[in-house]
Image (cartoon, rainbow, N blue to C red):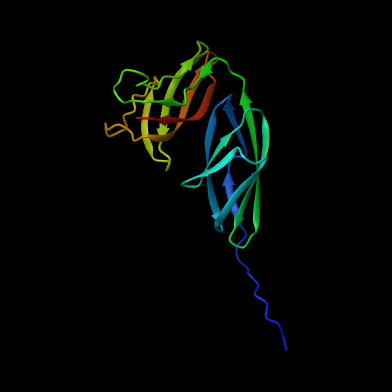
């Protein structure tokens, strides 16, 4: 009598994602990833606690110091794909990006305004919702009153921002952060 064994010859899990990101101190970033092969069932990291899974194949990363993370993507068979992620904290005191505002018409904190030192010029602000859809973009300015492309006010929630800056040497710097809208 023979025992029966089941052998799974599924495709190995394969993920595409950035390996290096830069954050401003006390800011977080949303990093999209693409599943090229397989199905992700669980995500964990080492060190633990600073990375969380968001809808739409995105990770939110928070770090308060330069750090190397190892991110573990596990499939339905328990097989794990390991991905390194190096986070570098920018020590740039000339840039401060608020992480919450409330465009509710009370004249208090109704407009999101970055604080950019004289070393930089704002090129463009681009804002995405949690599903990666473009909701707002403006060139030459970075003020946002909470209205989206169709003129309606954005719903309360978390939005991803890309702010393109140029310094006096005309070097491009892209800063990514998230902002929460409260009503």
Work out whether 44 lies above or below 135: below
Residue at image position (63%, 69%) is 8
Left or right of 21 in this view: 120: left
Q: Nearer the viewer, residue 63 or 95?
A: 63
At which x and y percent is residue 30?
51, 37
At which x and y percent is residue 84?
66, 42
Q: Nearer the viewer, residue 174 or 116?
A: 116
At which x and y percent is residue 171?
54, 20
Work out whether 37 lies above or below 115: below
Picture quarter with the C terminus: top left
Residue at image position (62%, 28%) is 64
Work out whether 1 lies above or below 72: below
Left or right of 92 in this view: 161: left
The quadrant holding residue 40 is bottom right
The quadrant holding residue 158 is top left
Residue at image position (44%, 26%) is 100
Work out whether 175 lies above or below 7: above
The quadrant holding residue 111 is top left
Picture quarter with the N terminus: bottom right
Query: As drawn, which residue projects farthest toward the top?
Result: 118
Left or right of 64 in this view: 54: left
């Amino acid at each position: 009598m023979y025992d029966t064994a089941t052998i799974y010859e599924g495709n190995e899990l394969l993920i595409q994602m950035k390996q290096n990101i830069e954050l401003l101190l006390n800011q977080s970033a949303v990093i999209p990833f693409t599943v090229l092969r397989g199905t992700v069932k669980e995500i964990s990291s080492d060190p633990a606690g600073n990375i969380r899974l968001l809808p739409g194949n995105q990770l939110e990363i928070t770090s308060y110091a330069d750090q190397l993370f190892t991110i573990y993507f596990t499939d339905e068979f328990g097989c794990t794909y390991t991905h390194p992620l190096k986070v570098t904290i920018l020590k740039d005191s000339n840039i401060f990006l608020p992480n919450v505002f409330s465009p509710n018409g009370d004249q208090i904190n109704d407009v999101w305004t970055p604080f950019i030192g004289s070393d930089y010029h704002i090129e463009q602000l681009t804002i995405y919702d949690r599903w990666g859809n473009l909701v707002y973009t403006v060139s030459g300015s970075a003020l946002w009153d909470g209205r989206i492309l169709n003129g309606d006010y954005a719903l309360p929630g978390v939005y991803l921002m890309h702010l393109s800056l140029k310094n006096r040497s005309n070097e491009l710097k892209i800063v990514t952060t998230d902002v929460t809208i409260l009503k």
